[in-house]
């Protein structure tokens, strides 16, 4: 933008901006394809949708295109409708949803390289637990499975199946009592399983031998609620098997002790794109309390950290974003693909599974990672199993 149009971003991002809004911040301008958080100043409305998952191609614009805005009048386009990925009539029905949970999502390893279009990576927030659940039933690590958040569904088996639950946040149980976690077990035809809340953690993963049948968008079955791809489970849904696969119960893994959740977490951070000594010292000076959390990120409250506006740039998984208000926001899988606030630090990839299990009210302390890191600390867990 020309210098006389430059304005700083809002001190705190608005929690929801309207779809199709034309906005500007700093030296940049753009269009909000969907309702989403953001700290840009709203100027007007685009009269053509720049994104619609039902359209071919879904994206009106691609990197490298030139855009000119012209004043006009007309009706605001409708918000893009969600694209349902669940088969209406699965070939191998396996589980019926008797009662949906708080947020039950089908995920696989994620939608890689979608950020160049503005889409989230999505996929499991706790990729290690998801991979262990799939491994326990003999699936590939990236087979579609169910992510269960805080309070899970009640499911009825429509055939004999072998399943495994890995993670925390809920306590799976059948009518005959609790079932093992991080270990495969059998559900007989007609048996029901439910997932009441547990004392610690936020989410876990239910894998079924053969994987869950689902459609794909950009080569992934992962639900992306912000991108209108897929949807949470609802009462009466029927989940099918992707393939028939024989698996035996009683096979599993134990998670590393250091990622078992509790009320307090210590997370290692490395310098981020806008690292400076003042911000890193403030960030590691004391504990933070989780004030809000979802699949986009965690808002923390504690010692203020120097931050503010930067030129919008790609956001990293685990990046710690600081608006001018000083409260950190840790970015997770459904974050916006670009952001214009300082990111002085990033959580090590190996600690992301622990981060994904934090609840509002939990406390977090950040410590600086050693200058020489082991490969296991920096590997992308979502692609490594």
Image: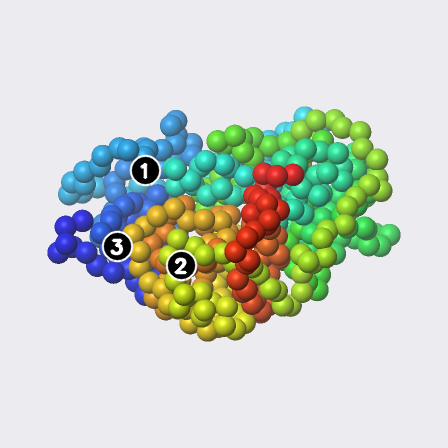
| Residue position marked by numbered label 3 in the rendering | 25
Residue at 31% of width from left, 59% of height from top?
A: 309
Residue 142 vs 330, above or below: the answer is above
Q: Is residue 327 left or right of residue 356?
A: left
Label tally? 3
Between 236 and 177, which is closer to the camera in this rendering? 177
Vertical placement of 277 versus 16: above or below?
below
Crowdedness near tag 3: few (<14), some (14–19) or many (≥20) residues, C-alpha within 10 Å = many
Tell me the distance, in whole angstroms, between the alpha carbons under discs 3 and 2: 22 Å
Farthest residue to the front: give it: 372
The numbered disc on residue 275 is 2
Residues at badges 2 and 1 in contact (C-beta under 8 Å)? no
Left or right of residue 230, residue 7 in this image: left
Q: Nearer the viewer, mark 3 or mark 2?
A: 2
Q: Kindly indicate the quadrant of the structure image that contains residue 263.
A: bottom right
- Quarter of the rendering containing residue 54: top left
| Real-space Cα separation, disc 1 to disc 3, in angstroms | 19 Å
Instruction: Specify the farthest residue to the right.
Output: 176
Q: Which residue is mark 1?
A: 50
Per the image, label 2 sits on a secondary structure element best described as loop
């Amino acid at each position: 933008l020309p210098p006389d149009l430059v304005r700083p971003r809002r001190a705190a991002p608005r929690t929801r901006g309207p779809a199709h809004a034309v906005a500007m911040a700093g030296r940049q301008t753009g269009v909000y394809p969907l309702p989403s958080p953001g700290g840009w100043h709203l100027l007007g409305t685009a009269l053509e949708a720049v994104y619609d998952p039902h359209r071919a191609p879904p994206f009106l614009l691609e990197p490298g295109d030139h855009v000119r805005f012209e004043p006009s009048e007309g009706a605001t386009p409708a918000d893009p409708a969600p694209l349902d990925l669940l088969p209406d009539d699965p070939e191998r029905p396996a589980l019926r949803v008797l009662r949906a949970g708080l947020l039950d999502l089908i995920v696989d390893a994620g939608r890689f390289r979608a950020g160049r279009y503005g889409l989230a990576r999505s996929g499991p927030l706790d990729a290690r637990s998801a991979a262990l659940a799939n491994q326990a039933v003999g699936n590939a690590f990236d087979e579609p499975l169910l992510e269960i958040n805080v309070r899970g569904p009640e499911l009825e088996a429509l055939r004999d199946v072998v399943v495994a639950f890995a993670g925390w946040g809920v306590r799976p149980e059948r009518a005959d009592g609790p079932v093992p976690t991080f270990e495969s077990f059998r559900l007989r035809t007609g048996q029901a399983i439910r997932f009441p809340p547990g004392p610690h953690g936020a989410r876990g993963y239910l894998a079924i031998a053969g994987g869950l049948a689902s459609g794909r968008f950009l080569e992934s079955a992962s639900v992306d609620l912000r991108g209108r791809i897929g949807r949470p489970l609802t009462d009466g849904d029927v989940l099918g098997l992707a393939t028939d696969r024989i698996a035996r119960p009683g096979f599993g893994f134990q998670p590393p002790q250091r990622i078992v959740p509790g009320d307090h977490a210590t997370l290692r951070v490395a310098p981020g794109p806008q690292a400076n000594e003042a911000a890193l010292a403030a960030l590691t000076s004391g504990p933070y309390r989780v004030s809000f959390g979802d699949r986009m990120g965690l808002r923390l409250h504690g010692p203020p950290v120097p931050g503010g506006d930067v030129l919008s740039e790609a956001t990293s998984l685990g990046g710690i974003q600081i608006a001018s208000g000083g409260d950190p926001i840790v970015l997770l899988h459904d974050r916006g693909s670009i952001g214009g606030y300082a990111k002085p630090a990033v959580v090590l990839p190996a600690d992301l599974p622990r981060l994904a299990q934090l609840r509002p009210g939990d406390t977090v302390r950040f410590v600086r990672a050693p200058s020489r890191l082991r490969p296991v600390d920096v590997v992308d867990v979502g692609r490594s199993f």
